[in-house]
Image (spheres, rainbow, N blue to C red):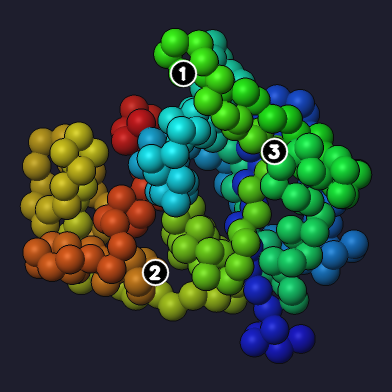
């Protein structure tokens, strides 16, 4: 197996799957024995707003976007149980990993999944009607149990969004890293990056911290007042994960 044949994919086991106790079933579908795929990283995530917004950035402005943020953050399935609001984020690695995983997941819409791929993971999902403030039906939100990267470019963006380099073993990272030479602080309230510690700011990285090379470039660009290659929030969101009360 050459390194050039290996792909990585982000998989998210979403709150509706967790509420229905489907974690074991889902993991069994991706077992190395059946698929040849291996874990590269796994974490239990309390999804902060920055992370949710960046993960679903392509849907910004759509009628279902606010509901989608509440869905992935666990507010819809655990409205009265904040301690249960979490997602299991996994990086899988292997030959043809992206297609293999998406075939097991099935079509995005659970109605389509039940017709086209009965028995797939998303066939267990549901479609939820959404209404506006007047009670009028405006469309549907898809609660489909699981997320899987659609292509190599999405996989790289999503893995880097949810995982820092040190969350993954060195031989399984797959993407270029760099080392910070300075301090970077982020204020979740103002969403501003700074090189100096200010009240309310969080230290994202310091001298010697390993980051994805592309993330390090974004931080450097922003600190120097240049337009970054992508939003700073897409860099810092992972560092707000599970920091109680921060960036939520």
Q: Are marks 2 and 3 in contact (CB under 8 Å)?
A: no
Q: Residue at x 44, y 10 (%)?
A: 134
Label at residue 149: none
Taking 10 as reference, is 195 left or right? Answer: left
Q: Which marked residue is nearer to the observer: mark 1 or mark 3?
A: 1
Distance from the alpha carbon under mark 1 to that under mark 2: 41 Å
Asked if the residues shown at circle 1 and circle 3 are in contact, with their CB atoms under 8 angstroms apart, the answer is no
| Depth order, front residue of 126/199 | 126
The residue where tag 3 is placed is 144
Viewer-side residue, 159 vs 57: 57
Visible in this render: residue 230?
A: yes
Residue 95 in the image, given as x and y percentages of width and height:
75, 76
Q: Nearer the viewer, residue 150 or 247?
A: 150
Q: Residue under label 2, please give it.
A: 212
- Count neighbours of disc 1 (C-alpha within 10 A) and say few if under 14, some if 14 to 19, many if 20 or more: few
* Residue 5 in the image, given as x and y percentages of width and height: 70, 84
Q: Which residue is mark 1?
A: 132
**Residue 125 on image: x %, y %:** 75, 34
Query: Tag 3: Cα neighbours inside 10 Å, few (<14), some, or many (≥20)?
Result: many
- Give neighbour class at mark 2: few <14, some 14-19, many 20+ (Cα, 10 Å): many
Label 2 element class = strand
- Of labels 1 and 3, earlier in sequence is 1
Q: Quadrant of residue 172?
A: bottom right
- Quarter the C terminus occupies: top left
């Amino acid at each position: 197996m050459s390194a050039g044949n290996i792909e990585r994919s982000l998989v998210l086991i979403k709150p509706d799957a967790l509420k229905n106790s489907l974690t074991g079933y889902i993991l069994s579908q991706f077992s190395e024995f059946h698929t040849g795929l291996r874990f590269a990283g796994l974490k239990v995530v309390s999804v902060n707003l920055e992370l949710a917004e960046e993960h679903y950035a392509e849907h910004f402005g759509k009628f279902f976007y606010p509901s989608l943020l509440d869905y992935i953050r666990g507010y819809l399935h655990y409205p009265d149980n904040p301690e249960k609001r979490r997602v299991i984020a996994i990086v899988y690695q292997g030959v043809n990993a992206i297609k293999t995983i998406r075939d097991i997941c099935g079509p995005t819409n659970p109605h389509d999944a039940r017709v086209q791929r009965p028995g797939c993971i998303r066939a267990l999902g549901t479609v939820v009607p959404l209404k506006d403030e007047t009670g009028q039906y405006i469309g549907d939100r898809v609660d489909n149990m699981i997320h899987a990267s659609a292509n190599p470019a999405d996989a790289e963006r999503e893995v880097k969004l949810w995982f820092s380099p040190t969350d993954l073993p060195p031989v399984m990272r797959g993407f270029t890293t760099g080392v910070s030479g300075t301090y970077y602080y982020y204020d979740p309230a103002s969403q501003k990056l700074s090189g100096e510690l200010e009240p309310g700011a969080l230290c994202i990285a310091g001298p010697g911290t390993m980051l994805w090379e592309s993330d390090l470039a974004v931080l450097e660009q922003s600190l120097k007042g240049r337009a970054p290659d992508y939003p700073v929030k897409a860099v810092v969101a992972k560092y707000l994960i599970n920091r109680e009360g921060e960036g939520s």
